Amino acid sequence: MADVHRATVVIITWNRPGYVDTCLSHLGRLHRPADQVLVVDASADVRTAEVVSRYPWAKRIAFPGGAGHMTRSRNQALLHANGDVVCYLDDDVKVQPQWLDEVLAAFTGDEAVGAVAGRTLNGQPGEETAGADAIGRLMDDGQLTGNFAADPGKIVEVDHGIGANMSFRAAVLADLGGFRDDFPGTALREDTDIYLRVRSLGHKAVFSPWAVVEHEAAPHVKGKRFDWRYLFWGRHNHALLLSRNFGLGSSQFRRWLVWAVLGSFSETGRSLPRRLLRVVVSLAGTAAGVVTSLRKAGWSATAPVANGPAAENLRAALTATR
């Protein structure tokens, strides 16, 4: 696998033109400009299109089917991407000027690296040191660590990354057949899933503390961030993540399931009605995830490589542009 030469940057958006404007303006200040910038826009109105039109080096891809379905938008971008590396940004991030240089540097010189996670700042006190020794880990009990704002002072290998700032070799995405597009609701864990699949093919995933973006965490088009939907779909999608990548019979799935059930009853610091509601929502999400897992996963891990017409179309598109 050759070193990287061209970079495609993808912004996924839905009805947040102001954030797209800010994101593009910061991309325009990169020390090393992107070779291609794609804005996959699910918006029903023209405001985002008008914003993108002010940046002649960016291309808008109108994709109404991406409304509420982020992974579909991610795959749509792959039909147009021509870079050796495809970088995904949330529309509410601001890249620092050296961001792309550092992303590409993390790939260069180590052909085993298939995915790079970048440092994603949230403006929280102490986040640069919190969890610096446990970034992007998948634990034995199936739980995840994040800590993607931490600075370990060096590039470190990780199990997974954050969707707001993640990059992949295009050839690896072609091998996988793109993203799995059936993580519903708030799309939680779709980013973890693609990293685990990259690693299951034998590639490394690394975290670069120098590929920095600032994440504003913009309001969602529907609902609020970390509302009841987050709890329900977080439990549902986590069950699906573990069952597919490790199997229903795996220790990760079984131990996480025990934690999810018992942990539902450990809520503190809220009124009794709210605690009871969280218990109900948490258990319902876990149960729904188990039901979905029984349909979509097996006793052993599901093959990481997607098949079917959609996956083949992505492979053909990514191969044709190399």
Image: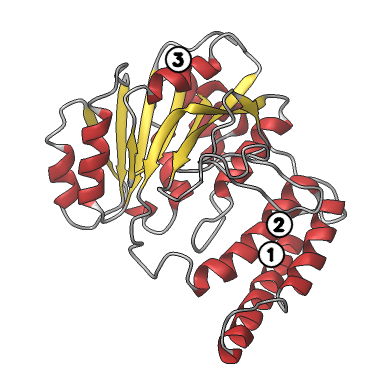
Q: Residue at x 68, y 50 (%)?
A: 144
Judge the density around disc 1: few (<14), some (14-19), many (≥20) Cα neighbours within 10 Å.
some
For the residues bearing labels 1 and 2, Cβ distance under 8 angstroms: yes
Residue behind mark 1: 292
Q: Residues within 10 Å of mark 3 (few under 14, many from 20)?
A: few
Label drawn at residue 322: 3
Q: Position of residue 116 (x, y in %)?
A: 55, 28
SS label for mark 2: helix
Dot placed on the residue nearer the N-terminal end, 3 or 2: 2
| Residues at circles 1 and 3 in contact by the CB criterion of under 8 Å | no
Is 19 on the left-hand or right-hand side of 171?
left
* Percent of width and height locating residue 215: 38, 45
Residues 112 and 66: in front is 112
Asked if 322 appears above or below 310 in the picture, the reply is above
Rounded to the nearest whole Å, what is the CA distance between mark 1 and mark 3?
Answer: 37 Å
Rendered-image quadrant of the N terminus: top right
Q: In the picture, residue 276 is in which quadrant?
A: bottom right
Residue at the location (69% across, 70% down)? 286
- Residue 48: give x, y in percent of width and height: 19, 48
Q: Amino acid at mark 2?
A: Lys
Residue 141 appears in the rendering:
yes
